[in-house]
Amino acid sequence: MTPSSTFFRSIIFLLLAILLTSSKEAIAQYTPNDYFERGKKMHKQGDLAKAIEYYSYALSLEANCVKCYYNRGMAFMATEKYHKSRSDFDKVLKIDPADTDAYEQRGSLHYLLGNYEAAISDYNFVIQVRPEASMYINRGMAHLEHSNYNSALRDLETAVRLEKNDPETYRIIGDVYFAKNDLETAIEYYGMALEIDPNNEQTLNNRGNTYHEMGLEALALQDYDHAISVYKNSYTYTNRANYWLKQGEYEKSLADCKKATQLDYNNAEAYYCVGLVENAKGNATVSLENFNKAIAIQNNRADFYNGRGLALFQLKEYGDALEDFEQAVTIDPSDAAARDRILDCRQNLGNSAIAQETSEEWEDWGDEETIEEDDTKYEIATASFSNDDLPEEFTARGITNYDFTAKAPAKPVMNRDIDVTTIDASEDFGASQIYENEMTNNKHSNTSSDQLKSEKYLELAEFYFKTNDYKEALQHYESALWHNKEAAIIHWKKAQCLIALEQNEDALLALDKYLTLSPSDVEVIYERGTLRLRTGNIFGAKEDYDKGLSLDSKHTKLLLSRAQWNAHKKYYIKAIEDYNALIQLDPQANSYYQRGLMWFELKTYNKAINDFTAAILDSDIEKHEYYFARGLAYQFSKTTESALYDFDKTISISPRFAKAYMYRAAIKSSMGDKDGTCSDYRKAVSLGYKVKDKINFVSHCK
């Protein structure tokens, strides 16, 4: 290094040091509060960049300025710099852990970032201090996005009680019911919202989507038109474009897509819709351009890659089409259509080895019998259901083809996008027909080919199911259904696979489909009822129990399940009626015991004692709960010696049952046995019995 270069570097460093020093001195000319006030002024004027700059100056002088972090966090949030905003609210809460406003804002940021559990946690803290309707709405929306539908409904119903005339709450409740696939109830709540605010474009849009899903196309169009007349929203135009597409009105669909992209050039769904329309019209090149735009904006949608793959296939670009179909399967492994198209692309690429192997596999399956609905479905069931304990907290099932709920918490008010209805590339708008025509010379007739493929995938699915590889089995069940949607047995087997994977909501949908095709299968009605109960849909479970018993009044498992349901709801007389029928059909000890508990709840102690006695006599083994229950019934009917005998027997069977000692202590006290009373009381406490209130009969015990 030359002396001159060293000299110039020294000069540069000196100048930088002077600049930094002068900058710090310039900043220090004002107090942190001066900068905060300037920042607040810029904030109110909408100059958020300048506001952030002044808040930052204030923080450089006072590192623990809570109001500076808070306001800067709000400014970052308004400019959609969510991670920086969250960092500022983290700092607020580090300095002041009790700042509920900061918890509220951070909860909103977690929501916007998709961290729904964290959002719920922050809203929990706020609700403890400020149980306001807006907070219940926010938490309800986070529960909705997290698919905790029952929790969402509880919060939103609480919000309604606190603020009855908020149309937003009714709309979001409608969104929850839509997510649960209860479309009629969703329509009802959207109607309530529109009674309060008849021109809310988001509610109109969402109700339009629901009508569209129900097949009520005229009503859907009416709502879309109304919504657009109120507010020209890009996503409502896209929804209406999808409506026109399904009606075959291609020019109207394109016109709405054009308006949608003019309003929001980042609306990927609108470009995707244009791609579908142009594909249906046979304009593969234009279609490809629009699918490219959609994927450039949103690259995680399997249907987008499927659409582009179809366009590429029409253009005979089989290698590129293959890549898109493979990407679709990567995103959605259950996409059976994409799997089939992969095979078609490989055949067209002239991959003789793969084509030959595939052909041989088809031939191996040529002699198999047609899929039949028979009793074999019961051979692969893996889930054993029990109604012994009803869940304390319920989580409802849900399914939706639309993701159109509000995308930001209610307070503070931020942009809540109205998402659009989605249409899969696999739906037939003419493009699929063009695709099939391309393959006419390469395949057998549709009917025989579909049957052959369905049987192949079903056999593979059952192989993987038997080896407990449920994920792989599920993919093959999906593929089998793609080729034979009306084979009820496959829907049932798919449900068993989903149950094994603990995907109960999806399993319920598969059982729904099975029962649509085989509505009188009592065993599956019972199975669905039990699964509904497990997932928290308790009234749906009761509906299945009633339906099953209307078909087979002597079905013992249904009788037991409905009896336990009635007992849980405290419908004791109805429960007794079911236990009466059950005992006539199958007089088991547990049924007597359960009926005895119902009589006990009704304070009919003599009948309870009779049933508990029958349970004791019919049981193959001595059960302490039978004796304990009878002892309680004797105690309440003031038959002291019999009660003492039963508590003695209970303790001899289960010496560590604390409650039995406590009740025996009460009996001994009534008999004047003070030492025995204290001995049993101390034993109960030593075994963990929690004494919540003062008990007079042991007041003398030390």
Image (cartoon, rainbow, N blue to C red):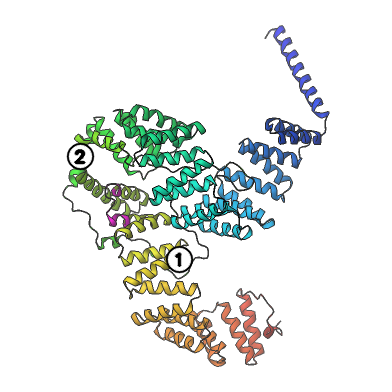
Task: Estimate the x, y position of residue 47 in percent, counting from the top left.
Answer: 69, 31
Q: Residue at x 35, y 42 (%)?
A: 247
Can residue 598 be seen from the camera position used here?
Answer: yes
Quadrant of the rendered structure where residue 556 is?
Answer: bottom left
Quadrant where the image shows the N terminus: top right
Quadrant where the image shows the C terminus: bottom right
Q: Is residue 646 left or right of residue 363?
A: right
Q: Which residue is mark 1?
A: 539
Q: Is residue 32 left or right of residue 459?
A: right
What secondary structure is the stretch in magenta mostly built from?
helix
Amino acid at dot 2 = Ser
Q: Are marks 2 and 1 in contact (CB under 8 Å)?
A: no
- Tell which circle, 2 or 1, labels the residue nearer the N-terminal end: 2
Amino acid at dot 1 = Phe
Q: Is residue 132 above or below residue 338?
A: below
Q: Secondary structure at mark 2?
A: helix
Q: Is residue 689 above or below residue 499?
A: below
Q: Which residues are magenta?
A: 480-492
Dot 2: within a 10 Å radius of its alpha carbon, few (fewer than 14), some, or many (20 or more) residues?
A: few
Q: Secondary structure at mark 1?
A: helix
Marks 2 and 1 sit apart, C-alpha to C-alpha, by 50 Å
Q: Is residue 260 above or below residue 578?
A: above
Nearer the observer: mark 2 or 1; the answer is 1
Let me know if residue 136 is in the magenta part: no
Q: Is residue 39 left or right of residue 443?
A: right
Q: Which residue is mark 2?
A: 359
Q: Residue at x 40, y 36 (%)?
A: 253
